[in-house]
Image (cartoon, rainbow, N blue to C red):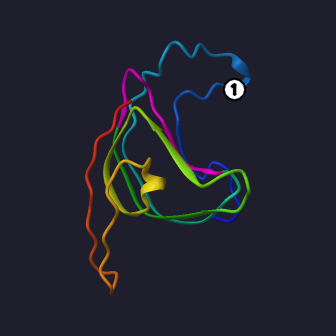
Amino acid sequence: MVNVSNPIIIDQEYCPWNLCNKQIPSKVKISNVSFKNIKGTSTTPLAVNFICSRSVPCDNVEISGIDRTYTGHKGLINSQCSNVKLATIVNVTKVLACGNHPPIITSKNHTKSHTSTISRSN
């Protein structure tokens, strides 16, 4: 990806033209989703954005091999997560994984990596 906005996103509160009632959470269950080997640049600082339903949180979301760079000047690259259970995080910087897992440890030859398993619900 080159210079994209909203590069990695799940948004269950999306409401075009304000025709929705955001007080009523989505009842669509999202699970078993993988974001793998995504590299490139973002024009917005929010490079990873997971906003899942309060009533049926996203679960078993996997992120691995995420390498994003922010090309703008409106702060630092970051991520936001709500109501999501991240199942697997491999080769992703802490800031792009909602800042809630230990640093990834990768061997010198890049063939082995430490996998962190976390759960997060806000």
Residue situated furthest front in the rendering: 75
Q: Quadrant of the N terminus?
A: bottom right
Q: Residue at x 63, y 48 (%)?
A: 6
Q: Give residue 3's quadrant in the image.
A: bottom right
Q: Quarter holding the C terminus?
A: top left
Answer left or right for 35 relative to 62: right
Residue at 26%, 62% in the rendered image: 115
Judged from the image, the secondary structure of the residue bearing numbered disc 1 is helix
Q: Is residue 68 magenta?
A: no
Front residue of 20 and 101: 101
On screen, 106 above or below 64?
below
Furthest residue in direction bottom, as rendered: 109
Q: Read off the magenta span.
A: 45-58
Query: What type is the residue that disc 1 sits on?
Result: Pro
Indicate the position of residue 58 as horizontal and vertical percent values: 38, 35
Q: Residue at x 33, y 38 (%)?
A: 120
Q: Residues within 10 Å of mark 1 (few under 14, many from 20)?
A: few
Q: Quadrant of residue 11?
A: top right
Q: Is residue 53 above or below residue 34?
A: above
User: Is 49 part of what is drawn in magenta?
Assistant: yes
Q: Which residue is mark 1?
A: 16
